Image (cartoon, rainbow, N blue to C red):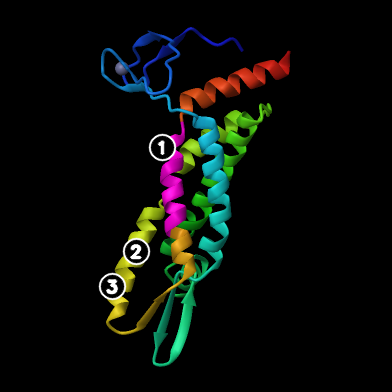
Amino acid sequence: MKTSNYLACPECDLLLHRTFPVAGEKVHCPRCNYLLHNPRANSIARTFSLSLTGLFLLFPANLLPIVGIKVLGNSHDGTLLSGSVTLFNEGMWGVAILVFLSSILFPVLNIVLALLISGHLYFNRANRYLSFWLRALKHIEEWAMLEVYLLGIIVACVKLAAMAELKFGLGLTAFVLLLLVTVMLSGSFDSTLFWQRIEQLNSHEKK
Ligand SMILES: [Zn+2]
């Protein structure tokens, strides 16, 4: 596949000459002002190191207790997974599935896919699944809503604080760090550059 010299504005379909701006130089559509390119410095290396950090944070965030609750002498540690399981056992399976997807599955996939893609690009390795992974990542990003879950934890803690003794666990620290890394990850991601590099790598492979 030859790289086309034209691209259509995703917002208003205006046909434009493809440009290759350098980092820090934003390109907007001349008709509707849609942000076409927003190149970021060292996007691939930054995405790679951030997703690697995220991978290590996934374990404590998911396995260590987020919050410990002590009621009438009984203490109970809650992890991300036990939250979903409790909701499921209480019959709120819709919420349980939503919590599981948005706080565990999608954030994990988000980090793993970002690591796979940036790792391949960083080490110049072609892979026929690269474009599939990148498309999947773009969809998953919208569904990984750690911040919504964090808000839920805060609300629950405020309500519970009156009737139970609360203790914040190391899992919460890891969870907040994971949230920060995820936000920085989407900020370091330059999809135009990633698409270009994937096209280059895969066309080299076919020759
Ligand atoms: Zn436009």
Q: Against 126, is 15 above or below?
A: above
Amino acid tagged 2: Gly
Identified at 58% across, 29% down, the residue is 131
Amino acid tagged 1: Gly
From the viewer's perspective, tell me whether residue 168 is left or right of residue 205: left
SS for dot 1: helix
Percent x, y for residue 45? Answer: 55, 33
Percent x, y for residue 143? Answer: 43, 47
Ligand 1 near label 1 (Cβ, under 8 Å)?
no
Mark 1 nearby-residue class (10 Å; few <14, some 14–19, many ≥20): few
Q: Is the Cβ of the residue at disc 2 closer than 8 Å to that at disc 1?
A: no
Amino acid tagged 3: Val
Q: Is residue 31 visible?
A: yes
- Residue 186: name its quadrant: top left
Percent x, y for residue 106? Answer: 50, 50
Q: Which residues are magenta?
A: 176-189
Mark 2 nearby-residue class (10 Å; few <14, some 14–19, many ≥20): few
Q: Which quadrant is the N terminus positioned in?
A: top right
Residue of label 1: 187
From the viewer's perspective, tell me whether residue 27 is left or right of residue 46: left
Identified at 45% across, 28% down, the residue is 41
Indicate which quadrant contains ligand 1.
top left
- Residue 116: name its quadrant: top right
Mark nearest the camera among 3 and 1 is 1
- Earlier in the chain: of badge 2 and badge 1, it is 2
SS for dot 3: helix
Residue of label 2: 152
Instruction: Kindly report the distance in space between the C-alpha atoms of the residues bearing marks 2 and 3.
Output: 10 Å
